């Protein structure tokens, strides 16, 4: 372990932002013996992921999944065919979900205290490269009460200054709203978690994974759902097997995808002031001349870093044209004692990435692991759509561009998981799997899946890709049968065949 410096400053390390990356960095540094403070401007720890992101979103995905399984129960002879699903008690679900998040907030506070990290509530901004001014933070009882991202700088009353040898910027990002007439009538992804009732008609605007996930939740819960995208399909950065399969299925189950369309105006006949937590009628006007009547409009058109809140210019920290903090491979900014991790630096906006980057930064600064750094290659990710999608490594298109089309070989398979064998064809979700292989040894450089269980299946395959697995390694592995996961081992071999009889999937394993 590296010797710690003498305390010429108030702290060895100050971390601005109490999200996953900031917490991982602060706690790891303190475990090495550094004097650490973490500053959070909102009333709770956990950041976007815990409070208005992946964690409460996954709760809602589970709720939607349970509802889909209730529909499926009739086909497994568990309920009479005439059974009607009960209405969703959205408000009670919200209260239970918020209670779970509150418990997590408490766990984070206890963990910080146990690791002897000073938890400072307030808004931090640079005075110079070693000095932060801390003023009153945003005061709201719920993180997601800032549905419209009211991020004005806090007043100067009660400010104090703290110094640190090293400072980490981990303030994350925020959703953006379009600059159109009536944009204030819509909510963003934060506002989704403030909704107190399920809208009967909803439009989700955007083509990324957040838009797809929330549209899927709304639809599964029973809302008439519109998805408005600027091009011909959502998830444009994902592999074609995911894009094409998911788009077709979303349309098949009744989600109305408005392609090559942009929202140009929102209006309502309701009198203000408006309570966006409750649905009320709105009219959407699009660039294609459509008028869509809905009760809720949710914009999921992108996010921007919160670098503007911390006064990076005062410390001389460089930003790119989008406001992302510019860092090197070791998370260091152009100012040698200031670092940035997580969404604020604009690369791989994923919670596990931020957490790993924060911990590795502290390993390097205080643990003596001089070359410890995160690799942004082969990071697995999941879209919690219906069905879920999972991916790691290069898409087929990216592999062609990087290695040349002639050196890439693709193996893919599409089928229906056995879970759907008792269901009519129109209610079956698709499963698709693709291996992208490079070179004469067929090194696997990309795996892409859509279908039941792929959100869990991808974990192990990500390890294989990270370790440089070859197609032969997959061929030599005896799979578990019958599972969807065996598709990556067996269905992609030329010596393995699927036979479909009627609408049920029957496995006939024919190994040479």
Image: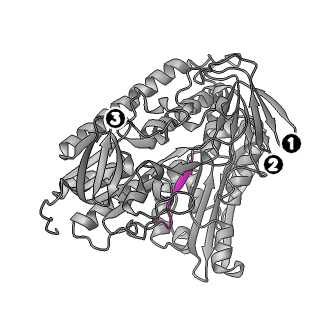
Q: How crowded is mark 1: few (under 14 residues within 10 Å), some or many (20 or more)?
A: few
Q: In the rendered structure, which segment of residues is drawn in magenta?
A: 376-383
Residues 208 and 67: in front is 208
Cα–Cα gap, marks 2 and 3: 41 Å
Which image quadrant: the N terminus? bottom left
Residue drawn at x 32%, y 40% as measured from the top left: 135
Cα–Cα gap, marks 2 and 1: 8 Å
Name the mark nearer the viewer: 2 or 1: 1
* Residue 337 visible to an observer of this rendering: yes
Q: Disc 1 or 3, which lies upstream in sequence?
A: 3
Position of residue 489 measured from the top left corner of the image (x, y, whole percent): 57, 63
Badge 2 marks a residue whose secondary structure is loop
Q: Residue furthest right?
A: 289
* Residue 495 visible to an observer of this rendering: no
Query: To which residue does mark 1 refer?
Result: 288
Q: Which residue lies furthest to the bottom in this view?
A: 440
Badge 1 marks a residue whose secondary structure is loop
- Mark number, residue 260: 2
Query: To which residue does mark 3 refer?
Result: 105
Residue drawn at x 27%, y 67% as measured from the top left: 364
Figure check: 369 above or below 356: below
């Amino acid at each position: 372990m590296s010797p710690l410096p003498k305390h010429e400053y108030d702290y060895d390390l100050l971390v601005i932002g109490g999200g996953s990356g900031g917490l991982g960095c602060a706690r790891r540094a303190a475990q090495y013996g550094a004097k650490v403070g973490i500053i959070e401007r909102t009333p709770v720890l956990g950041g976007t992921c815990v409070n208005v992101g992946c964690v409460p979103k996954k709760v809602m995905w589970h709720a939607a999944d349970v509802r889909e399984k209730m529909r499926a129960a009739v086909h497994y002879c568990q309920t009479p065919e005439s059974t009607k699903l009960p209405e969703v008690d959205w408000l009670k679900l919200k209260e239970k979900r918020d209670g779970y998040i509150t418990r997590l907030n408490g766990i984070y506070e206890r963990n910080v205290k146990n690791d002897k990290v000073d938890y400072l509530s307030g808004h931090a901004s640079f005075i110079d490269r070693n000095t932060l001014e801390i003023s009153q933070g945003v005061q709201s009882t719920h993180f997601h009460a800032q549905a419209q991202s009211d991020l004005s700088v806090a007043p100067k009353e009660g400010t104090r200054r703290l110094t640190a040898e090293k400072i980490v910027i981990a303030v994350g990002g925020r959703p953006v709203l379009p600059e159109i007439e009536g944009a204030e009538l819509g909510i963003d992804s934060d506002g989704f978690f403030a909704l107190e009732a399920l809208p009967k008609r909803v439009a989700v605007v955007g083509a990324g994974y957040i838009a797809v996930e929330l549209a899927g939740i709304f639809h599964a819960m029973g809302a008439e759902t519109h998805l408005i995208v600027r091009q011909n399909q959502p998830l444009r950065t994902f592999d074609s097997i995911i894009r094409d399969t998911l788009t077709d299925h979303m349309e098949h189950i009744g989600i109305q995808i408005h392609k090559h369309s942009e929202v140009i105006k929102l209006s309502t006949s309701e009198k203000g002031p408006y309570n966006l937590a409750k649905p009320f009628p709105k009219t959407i006007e699009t660039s294609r001349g459509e008028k869509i009547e809905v009760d809720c409009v949710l914009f999921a058109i992108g996010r921007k870093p919160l670098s503007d809140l911390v006064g990076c210019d005062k410390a001389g920290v460089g930003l790119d044209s989008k406001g992302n903090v510019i860092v090197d491979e070791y998370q260091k900014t152009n100012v040698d004692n200031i670092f940035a991790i997580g969404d604020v630096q604009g690369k791989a906006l994923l919670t596990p990435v931020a957490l790993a980057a924060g911990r590795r930064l502290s390993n390097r600064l205080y643990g003596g692991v001089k070359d410890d750094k995160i690799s942004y290659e082969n990071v697995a990710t999941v879209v919690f759509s219906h069905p879920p999608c999972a991916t790691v490594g290069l898409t087929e298109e990216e592999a062609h561009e990087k290695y040349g089309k002639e050196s890439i070989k693709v193996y893919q398979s599409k089928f229906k998981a056995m879970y759907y064998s008792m269901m009519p064809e129109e209610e079956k979700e698709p499963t698709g799997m693709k291996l992208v292989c490079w070179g004469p040894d067929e090194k696997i450089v990309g795996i892409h899946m859509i279908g039941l269980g792929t959100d869990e299946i991808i974990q192990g395959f990500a390890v294989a890709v990270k370790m440089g697995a070859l197609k032969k390694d997959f061929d030599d592995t005896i799979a578990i049968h019958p599972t969807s996961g065996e598709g990556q081992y067996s269905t992609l071999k030329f010596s393995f065949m699927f036979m479909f009889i009627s609408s049920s999937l029957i496995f006939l394993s024919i190994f040479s």
